[in-house]
Amino acid sequence: MSITKQTVAILGAGGSMGSAIAKSIAGGNYRLLLFDSDPKQLGELSQQIRDKHPEADTHFMSCPHETSWEADIIILAVPHEVEKELTDKIRDVATQKVVISIANPVDEDFEKLTTRPDTSAAEELQEWLPHSKVIKAFNTTFAADFEQPVIDGKQTDAFIAGDDEEALIIVSELVETAGFNPIIAGDLTVSGTLERMQLLLIQLTIKNNYKWHAGWKILH
Amino acid sequence: MYEQLKKSLQEHVTLSDKEWELCKHSFRPKRMLKRQFLLQEGDVCRELAFVEKGALYSYSLDMSGNKRVIRFAFEGWWMANLQSFFTGKPTRLNIEVLEDSELLILDRKNHEMLLEQVPPYERYHRIIVQNAYVALQRRVENALGLTAEEKYERLIAESPAFLNRVPQHLIASYIGVSPETLSRVRGSYNR
Ligand SMILES: NC(=O)c1ccc[n+]([C@@H]2O[C@H](COP(=O)([O-])OP(=O)(O)OC[C@H]3O[C@@H](n4cnc5c(N)ncnc54)[C@H](OP(=O)(O)O)[C@@H]3O)[C@@H](O)[C@H]2O)c1
């Protein structure tokens, strides 16, 4: 872990995932910049972070471009279909930065993915941000898992995929700070598998009523 | 966002449009605020920073926690701890933001890629390191065996107007005299 603080931007910080990630890493050596298109969504989050981590270095931002410009790591915590318009706003300041794709591009009925079978949300994001280091992470964990990453006595695994070695390490540290066991699964083309794993977990959660608190664990 | 970098490159070398595009896309644009750290003691310096706007300074801390300023960087200048960058050993320096800044940051991997793929960049980098070496040598000469008055005179003579932007206690630390001595020397110099 570096001694120098890294700055993490969360775009969509007011959503279920955005706020769960913010709360879970606020105690780490990070400066957090939180943006949501509806600032009202951030009110409660600010209090929740302060209650748990009085020392947290957290800032509420009003513009996604400024937020991303100041960041080293950018987390897009919005639905995949919103990512495209967001990337148009931040592309010039996201160059060479780690951009985390957490999206699962599932359809409304949780029946299938909306992306073509030969690609993934993460690979599409990489096309939209050709000069950024896109890393797939946090997509195989539910928002509720961040409160309790240990399920049935086992620490949930969190899979990571991407092409840049250093970026993979940076994201592994972030995932560990959030309380999960990071597993580097492969390059960015593995993202499709990770997104399909989560589609399956969503379907099983609905079928077997896991109450949105379930995760993956490799036993070995 | 890239004006100063382009200007700095053009001062020393000629790049094709394609080479410039490759250079440009290799840097991470980062806005930083006063008092933030670009690098802290104990980390390895893995990046070179170019100042598009604003100012940075590097320093070490003595046993009592006083800053010993090594150098400043203003717009158009580079900043890094080259010793740590080249040896891969943890740095003993801190690099702190002096004024809100817009930086362009180049990591080692991209730096090496540019050295290999953009020959004018290699030439440019050689000139920058050469100049840094000359400046460092002058700084060592100035630090050794000059009186406080001489140090201050040299500083005024050699350093650009930028120094107006630096608080006096950091200038004192930079030339290695106490703030009181600096204030005395400035008093007599201005008379
Ligand atoms: N929920 C999970 O358990 C889970 C798990 C893994 C991955 N994911 C992925 O995480 C991402 C976020 O999901 P979520 O469950 O956190 O959703 P959510 O609670 O509905 O939050 C979505 C966020 O996106 C923002 N947003 C929506 N439309 C927008 C637009 N047009 N422009 C700007 N911002 C917009 C919302 O902003 P407003 O506040 O303005 O509405 C909100 O901050 C999705 O890609 C999802 O696939 C979710």
Image (spheres, coloured by chain):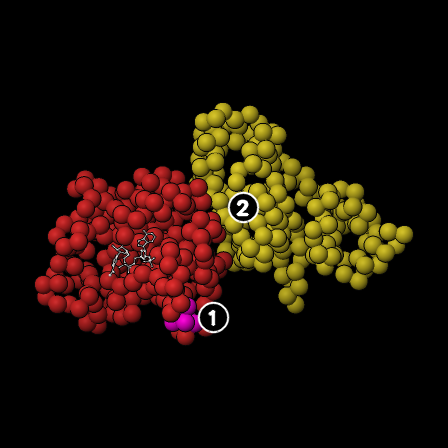
Chain colours: A red, B yellow
Looking at the picture, which amino acid does disc 2 mark? Leu
Q: Which x, y percent locates residue A212?
A: 19, 66
Residue A180, image x and y in percent?
Answer: 29, 63
> Which residue does the numbered mark 1 point to in the structure image?
A55
* Magenta stretch holds residue B20: no
Q: Is residue A76 left or right of residue B41?
A: left
> Which residue position is annotated with label 2?
B103
Q: Residue at x 50, y 27 (%)?
A: B119
Q: Considering the numbered disc 1 on the image, is that residue within a helix, a strand or a loop?
A: loop
- Secondary structure, mark 2, is strand
Q: Is residue A149 left or right of residue A197?
A: right
Note whether ligand 1 is within 8 Å of mark 2.
no
The residues tagged by marks 1 and 2 sit, at their Cα atoms, a distance apart of 27 Å
Give the residue displayed 49% in from the left and 30% down from the top.
B20
Chain label for disc 1: A
User: How many labels were placed on the picture?
Assistant: 2
Q: Does A144 appear above or below B5? A: below
Q: Quadrant of residue A23?
A: bottom left
> Which residue is drawn at the image coordinates 47% and 41% (left, top)?
B27
- x, y percentage for residue B87? 52, 47
Residue B23 at least partly seen = yes
> Residue A24 versus residue B110: which sits nearer the camera?
A24
Q: Looking at the picture, which amino acid does disc 1 mark?
A: Glu
Q: Residue at x 62, y 58 (%)?
A: B60
Quadrant in which residue A60 is drawn: bottom left
Q: Nearer the viewer, residue A209 or B88?
A: A209
The image position of residue A11, as x and y in percent, is 37, 55
Q: Where are the magenta residues, as a range?
A: A46-50
